[in-house]
Amino acid sequence: MTDLQTYLGAFGHTLIMSEDLNEYVHSHSLDIVPGGNDDEDMPQFLIRPGADLEKLRGGPSVIFDGLMPKPGRYRAWTQFRRHDTIHTFVTTFEVKER
């Protein structure tokens, strides 16, 4: 889909909690994509400074970045806005020791 709307200034939000509820990570979708294959290509902003956030549409790829503070089980809640409705998706994953 390519019609995601911005929600709180980003195309998505993720909250990640450790199983013991002592560690958390909050991540917004990345709004910068790398340039082309040439090293001189500059990254491109998906959401340009000063853009009208209500007119922007995003997708199909939405990328999140997060550094988990320790190994263990984590649960992530991710929210997107589409057709003026907030959709929440939940996933559980394991972070291994390095």
Image (cartoon, rainbow, N blue to C red):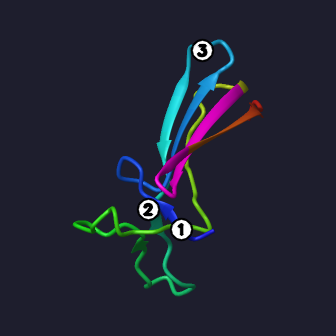
Callouts 3 and 1 close, C-beta under 8 Å: no
- Could you tell me which residue is drawn at 44 percent across and 84 percent down? 41
Q: CA distance from mark 2 to mark 1?
A: 15 Å
Q: Quadrant of residue 91?
A: top right
Q: Earlier in the sequence, mark 2 or mark 1?
A: 1
Q: Quadrant of residue 66?
A: top right
- Asked which secondary structure carries label 3, the reply is loop
The answer to whether marks 3 and 2 mark residues whose Cβ atoms lie closer than 8 Å is no
In x, y percent, where is residue 51?
27, 68
The earlier-in-sequence mark between 3 and 2 is 3
| Image location of residue 39, percent across then percent down | 49, 82
- Check disc 2: other Cα within 10 Å, few if <14, some if 14-19, many if 20+: some
Q: Would residue 46 be found to the left or right of residue 69 on screen?
A: left
Question: Residue 67 placed where, x, y %?
Answer: 56, 38
Nearer the observer: mark 2 or 1; the answer is 1
Mark 3–mark 1 distance (CA, rounded to whole Å) = 34 Å
Asked whether 27 falls inside the magenta stretch, the response is no
- Amino acid carrying label 2: it is Asp
How many residues crowd around disc 1 within 10 Å: few (fewer than 14), some, or many (20 or more)? Answer: some
- Identify the residue at horizontal 41%, vertical 50% (top origin): 7
Q: Which residues are magenta?
A: 74-86
Q: Label 3: which residue?
A: 21
Q: Which residue is mark 2?
A: 31
Mark on residue 3? Answer: 1
For the stretch drawn in magenta, what is the main secondary structure?
strand
Residue 79 falls left or right of residue 90: left
Quarter of the figure with the C terminus: top right
Q: Is residue 94 above or below residue 30?
A: above
- Where residue 14 appears, as percent x and y from the top left, is 54, 40
Mark 2 and mark 1 residues within 8 Å of each other at the beta carbon: no
